[in-house]
Amino acid sequence: MVRIKIIETFIITIVFFLSFLLSSYANQNVEEIIKGRKAMFSENYQNAKTISILLKSKKMEEAKPLMEKISKNYIKLLDYFPENSKEGFNTEALPSIWENKDEFNALMQKASDDMIKLAGAIDTADDLRAIQKELMWSNCSSCHNRFRAPH
């Protein structure tokens, strides 16, 4: 009888510690997800500003790899909004992302596609500012207006 009690206590203790460790691991993953997506959006913004500077200086070929990087980041970002990452860790993501997931994903895909279009259009565009606004900055505004908390 005493031996059974000891075994029960041992099992309960193990289950308790495992559940604690698993919940800590899950929170760590959520933190990594939220911080990861914030880092990618920040990188996209920094690259977009650099692209604008490069295009103003007519350095088209230097701008193109940054456009490709932004495009790839938008595709990666599709995986950075799981259900368990709606809150915490200073996320500025609005619930509308999860309420309108198809719309959000379509916008991320469009932003990615538009960066590839921009890379192809800059060599022949008459107005570089207008093409940037249409294919780069307007996607940022569309997303921020619908899916990001004001800051």
Image (cartoon, grey):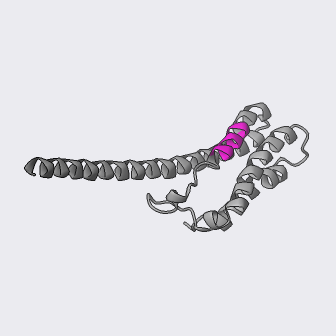
What residue do we see at 11% from left, 47% from top?
Answer: 3
Q: Is residue 31 left or right of residue 10?
A: right
Give the position of the C terminus as an image quadrant: bottom right
* Percent x, y of residue 71: 71, 42
Image-based side of 126 in relation to 26, left or right? right
Residue drawn at point x = 44 percent, y = 51 percent: 31
- Return the x and y of residue 136 as percentages of the image width and height: 75, 51
Side (left or right) of 27 relative to 37: left
Which range is magenta?
Answer: 67-76
Residue 37 x/y as whole percent: 56, 49
Above or below, 47 against 92 in this view is above
**Going by the picture, which residue comes out furthest to the top?**
61
User: Which of the two residues, 1 or 10, is positioned nearer the viewer here?
Assistant: 1
- Foreground residue among 56 and 107: 107
Residue 56 vs residue 34, the one in the foreground: 34
The image quadrant of residue 94 is bottom right
Q: Majority secondary structure of the magenta segment?
A: helix
Residue ranking furthest to the front: 1
Residue 121 at what x, y percent from top left? 87, 41
For the point 32% across and 48% down, the residue is: 21
The number of numbered badges drawn on the structure is 0
Name the residue rendered at 57%, 49% in the picture: 42
The quarter holding residue 149 reads bottom right
Q: Nearer the viewer, residue 64 or 95?
A: 95
Magenta-colored stretch includes residue 53: no
Task: Give the left or right position of residue 49, taking residue 126 as reference.
Answer: left
